Amino acid sequence: MDQAPPDIPRGETDRMIAEVEAFTPAEALARVREAESRDAERPGHREPMIVNLGPQHPSTHGVLRLITQLDGEIIRDIHPVIGYLHTGIEKQCENKTYWQAITLVTRMDYLAPFYNIHAYTQAAEKLLDLRVPPRAQYLRVIMSELNRISSHLVWLGTSGLELGAITIFFYSYREREKALDLFEMIAGERMNTRYFQVGGCADDMPPGFEKRLRALLDELPARIDEYEDLLSQNPIWLERTKGVGILPAEQLIDLGVTGPALRAAGVDLDLRKRTPYSSYEHFEFDVPLGTTGDAYDRYSVRMRELRESVKIIEQALDGLPEGPHIADDRKVVLPPRAELATSMESLIHHFKLVTEGFTVPEGEAYVAVESPRGELGCYLVSDGGPKPYRCHVRDPSFVNLQALRPMAKNAYLADLITMIGSLDNVMGGVDR
Amino acid sequence: MLESTVFVDEPVWLVIIKSAFVIFIVVTAFAYLLLAERKLIGRFQVRYGPNRAGPFGLLQPLADVVKLVFKEDFVPAGANRVLFVMAPVFTVVAAIGAIALIPYGDGTAELFGQEFNLVGADINVGILFLFALSGIGFYSLILAGWASGNKYSLLGSARTAAQLVSYEVAMGLSIIGVVMMAQTLSLVEVVNAQQDALWYIVFQPLGFLIFLVAGVAETNRAPFDLPEAESELVAGYHTEYAGLKFAMFFLAEYVNIIIISAFGATLFLGGFDGPFLPGFLWLAVKVSVLLFLFIWLRATLPRLRYDQLMAFGWKVLLPLATLNLIITAIVVALGFAN
């Protein structure tokens, strides 16, 4: 099969964008039926087989449903149907005070909880015009990058599993477990932490944390070598990933694809470099780029990002500034526990913050962070009250998923699985 | 021509005892191959594997079987009832039937004063018969997928058919080398020929490699496990099977692995031939080595894609097997063999 991407003119791209919108199940089926009845009249017509992949399917990364038209092993067309994991988190945020909503937003992209809160808290901080102390910014960078490592390890394990490489799954989860242990140590929860608060971080590093983190960082490069030993030169792995799921960089940009999927196509877009936030400008790291944008490039970009993340955490630990871990603004930030027993004023602040939350000046703010999957942005609108008027999250999984349909046309069924894996969509983020 | 081994006629009761014994051994071997595989893959994957049921998890196979027996046994509404029920039966019959041809000892032994052969049946077209049985086994997989009335199953069967055609040919050609050297199609004679000379892996290393690769494909094992690629086809041809019917497919798959290993050991590694130990132990050792290889492959390699599998079969294995065949033919014709 010819995998070379067709040279798509501008107008065609626009049309494709319009077509890749997600459907409701009824709409998708109606479209399939319509296409069928149209095709059936053509002479020499071969009836495609319609296979419903998902929402319960071993490798659709959760509950993605793909209505697939198959001609033998070749995909004629797919219709993605989403919404099976709809949680209504965005809407629920409108009924929570700003600090309560943090607990909810972590649960969107459940493999990258720190990024969800990071975008959200930064948006709230922007509205409040609140400065985050440098130590808190560094702590945020450390936890974010550790989260990038854990998220990429999940991706590596599951996408390996989908291609039949079962062992890599256990290897990568072994290291992910250590990252989760560190999350638990610093935030009390292994996933869905609410470690970042508006104004900084919930607490400083607990004693012993740095030692364990450094031990993990020392171990990781050798472990990443181990993963690469298993896969990077493996002829079957190369056969399965090289040349699979290529879209031209221009079309990827038109579709709004960001993150490793875009960088694999050679587009140097990394928000940590383009619009540095949370002191990212202090760190030296490379942005790994690919050339062709196939599944192998996405794999290799993510593997190199793992190594870069290790470097960033090491720099952040070495240069960790002294100072408070959270801003000293009593109208927004909970007072330290010890003060409650001695200061009446602190007690009042504490009571006010916990019962009705803090008010945020009227306005709107959009802040984006570079999540393991791409640009994760949070758009907050405040009407001046203690609850967000609107909280919208631009989740990279949702936007990147749009690229699946143009990619999958005329590909092999087995390659569809590779593509879903290499796009690394998290359905929690898609459905929000 | 080689000297022919003495074969004794056996009374019916002895044949029944012998078959029952061999089938018992192989079915037990299946159960413990399953356990061994899970244990070994566990070790490959930095975990323990099953270790709860009984000491070292030794009762795990029993627990699995009990679970499967008590599962609901249903036939989906869209299925072709007769074929759906018959397919697992065919596959088990084909798998177990093949055991009869593997010789597990030299010459004869005695039971209750009655001599018997240390092989189920020494047919003069043994190798061809084995191929025929494996063909029937594949046929039942195709039937199962088609009769299920499930699209995933159908796709799994289509892949099975393609795989069968691609790899059966290469495997057949790789074996013809051995047949030419031994000048016989009987498995007992092949072993006897190896006892007289060297094991055929020495003369036929390429043939052995092709046989192994094709054997992995024939048994639907990773990296050629496309007919049941779980990430694409859920479970392939046995998606709709549950309970005992599923257990029969499972049994057949693993018995087939044992058969292919025993077949390979017989053709290339001298079968029951070896010093000191009794013949069946040697055969068991050789089979175990090949089985370990199967498990190792599964733990290490990703799965091929359908078209890549076909390309590999037709463009790599088949030409190599043909080349091997031509060279062997020339050598044999010049009179160097044996």
Image: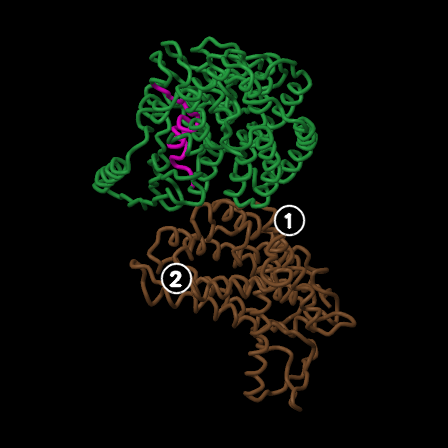
Question: Is label 1 in a helix, a strand or a loop?
Answer: helix
Quadrant for residue A362, please give it.
top left
Queried whether the magenta region covers residue A394, the answer comes back as yes
The answer to whether one can see residue A293 in this image is no
Question: Is label 2 in a helix, a strand or a loop?
Answer: helix
- Chain letter belonging to callout 1: B
A45 sits left or right of A61 in the view: left
Of all residues, the one furthest to the right in this rendering is B276
- Against B265, is B116 above or below? below
Q: Residue A219 location in percent, x, y?
A: 69, 33
Q: Nearer the viewer, residue A314 or B325?
A: A314
The mark that comes first in sequence, 1 or 2, is 1
Label 1 amino acid?
Answer: Phe
- Against B220, is A382 above or below? above
The answer to whether one can see residue B244 in this image is yes
Same-chain status of marks 1 and 2: yes
The residue at which mark 1 appears reads as B44
Of all residues, the one furthest to the bottom in this rendering is B113
Q: Residue B11 location in percent, x, y?
A: 57, 89
- Against A302, is A70 above or below? below
Q: Nearer the viewer, residue B323 or A252?
A: A252
Quadrant of the snapshot with the C terminus of chain A? top left
The residue at which mark 2 appears reads as B143
- Chain letter belonging to callout 2: B
Quadrant for residue A103, please give it.
top left
Queried whether the magenta region covers residue B4, the answer comes back as no
- Against B191, is A20 above or below? above
- Which range of residues does the magenta coloring cover? A390-412
As drawn, the chain in brown is B
Q: Colour of chain A?
A: green
Quadrant of the snapshot with the N terminus of chain A? top left
At 28% from the left and 34% from the top, the residue drawn is: A24
